Image (tube, rainbow, N blue to C red):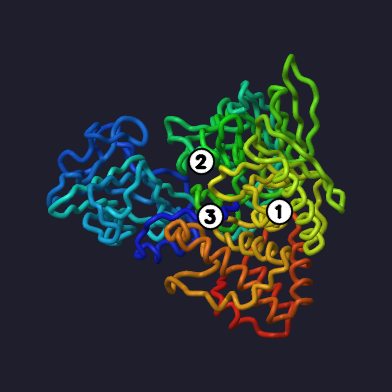
Amino acid sequence: MRRLIAIIAAAAAAAASLAAAPAAASHAAAACTPAQVVGNGGFETGTTPWTASTGVIFTGGGQTAHSGGRFARLDGTGGTHTDTLTQTVTLPAGCSAASLTFWLHVGTAETTTGIAYDTLTAKIGGTTLATYSNLDRNTGYAQKTIDVSAFAGQTVTLAFTGTEDSSLQTSFVLDDVALDVSGGAPAADPVRTPATPSYTVNLSSDATGATWTGHESVTFTNASATPLPEVYLRLWDNYHGTCPSNTPITVSQVTGGTAGALTVGCTALKITLPAPLSQGHSATIGFDLSVAVPSGADRFGRDGAYSFIGNALPLLAIRDAAGWHLDPYTNNGESFYSLASDFTVTLDHPASLSVPATGTSTDTPGTAGRTVTTATAAKVRDFAWAAGPFQKITGTSASGVRVGVYRVSAISASSAQSMLSTATGALDAHAQRFGAYPYAEADVVLDNNFWFGGMEYPGFVLDLVSSTALAHEFAHQWWYGIVGDDEYTSPWLDESFADYATDLYFGRTGSGCWNSVSWASSAENITNSMAYWDAHSSRYSTVVYGYGKCALHDLRRLIGDSAMTTLLRAYAQGHWYGVSTTAEFKAAAQAATPTDLTAFWTQHRIAG
């Protein structure tokens, strides 16, 4: 979720016009069945249905596949050369969202750091999506994601062209190419459904706490007048594996519906209900679940003896006026969009492991040498936990919230104590501004190997030893956690607001910060979606975090401190456990002042 360090990735500016539209913004009248439309994207069955230059699809040659045994290598000859790789694909009518993903490894003998001698161009039809070069060299594969929703309903040719100059080879190695389409429920239905989800989960871990198996069920209600013939589960952490052959989240033995094939990079699973669910009626689906935490200090990853397990529980996707929200996973920020839900999660684990988790936890003895941690959480949007031989300290904020700080062995006791002080102080300060924190507990898990800085879940935070990062993550308990939003479509609604709240906590006024704003293009807005920021990832942190909070400081100066304080508190209370949109916030801000804010929104590029 809250990434304080943006991922830098190359993408051509020509993709801006495609990426600027939110992935689920179009309202198509026809029904859409989410699907992956590229054939043989891993090249395992040879060239069909690709058309390729001789020798492009093969194995060996000093290269390895991202998954399986085959891959496509364009160029790498060390002489003047052009290779092509094409496939004609059909993006079904009625599907409003489309996302092209592929894994790319660039190996080169070029030594320059400033001249693109050899290039790889990705195109759809006559439109260039992105261009890569010898300047994008990397030691392994990097995933590229490009929004191609503008081509919904069309049959087009997907083409990769590698061009090499007269000397010094560059190899462009592609694997696991996919084009996922989704979206397209009736536009006349603004209701968010399935509503009031209630999850019951029972999992047991191996000796390390890195592998968990068990069962999950979810009961839900159709809040919409439109019948609900199916639901979708989001298996977000399958992004971290290899689709479809090696996914870390496995769902099997589904009851209460019929499971389809995994789509959207194996992160979406359609469950067709036995009969369409009418408005006000409830249903339950259940399934066996296994979770395998991969190596790496990530929001879903393992750092030595410590496992961090965020976004691992399959959650219900939302259907609203834009259709089913089945956006792709983004590692640059967040794709998550969920309704306030209830969780009862039972985690059976070795007694030697501590298991901090979302919600209020109680430990009871299990079988020999094991402990059963039962965590209950009401009105939260997600559930996360960790497992490992953490050192723990606890404290209580002035308002009575119990805070646990868990540290890996490399972090000192004094650092943990300092972070506990920040946690309790920030919780109380944010609560005073936006409304009382509604949960009894909050856990902080510290590891300085986290590449992303900090990451928040309801009542549960992963963080470096950084008071600024921790205050930011605790601001997210309100701005995303309590006041929800569609994080893929409108990331500014939580990131900008959390960074603004962090400034307030530290007494920073943001004086003059808007003076340093410099836009990269006419398409760049604070309110752009993650589809845009994934194509322009080097600008994400600058604009959404930096310019976004500066805009809120400017709004405060324009309408006055008192009016801004009242606005944010009233807005939070009015959207408590609900979902915020840019249009709703702009309307609330306008209602808080007699000053016409039209010019303000235009100047600060807050659209919607």
- Residue at the image point whose x is 52% and y is 48% from the top: 326
In this rendered view, identify the residue nearer to me: 40 or 412.
Answer: 412
The answer to whether residue 192 is seen in the rendering is yes
Position of residue 193 in the picture relative to residue 526 (left or right):
right
Q: What's the residue type where badge 3 is placed?
A: Ile
Q: Could you tell which of marks 3 and 2 lies nearer the N-terminus?
A: 3
Q: Would you say the residues marked 3 and 2 are in contact, meaning their CB atoms lie under 8 Å apart?
A: no
In this rendered view, identify the residue nearer to me: 387 or 359.
Answer: 387
- Where residue 5 is drawn, which disc sits there? 3
Position of residue 571 in the picture relative to residue 519 (left or right):
right
In this rendered view, identify the residue nearer to me: 289 or 408.
Answer: 408
- Where residue 474 is drawn, which disc sits there? 1
- Residue at the image point whose x is 62% and y is 27% from the top: 209
Choose mark 2 or mark 1, whichever is in front. 1
- Residue at the image point whose x is 62% and y is 64% from the top: 496
Please give the residue where the numbered disc 2 appears in the rendered image: 267
- Near mark 2 (Cα within 10 A), the count class, few <14, some 14-19 or many ≥20, is many
Task: Name the spot of residue 539 as percent of width and height, x first.
Answer: 47, 63
- Which secondary structure, mark 3? loop
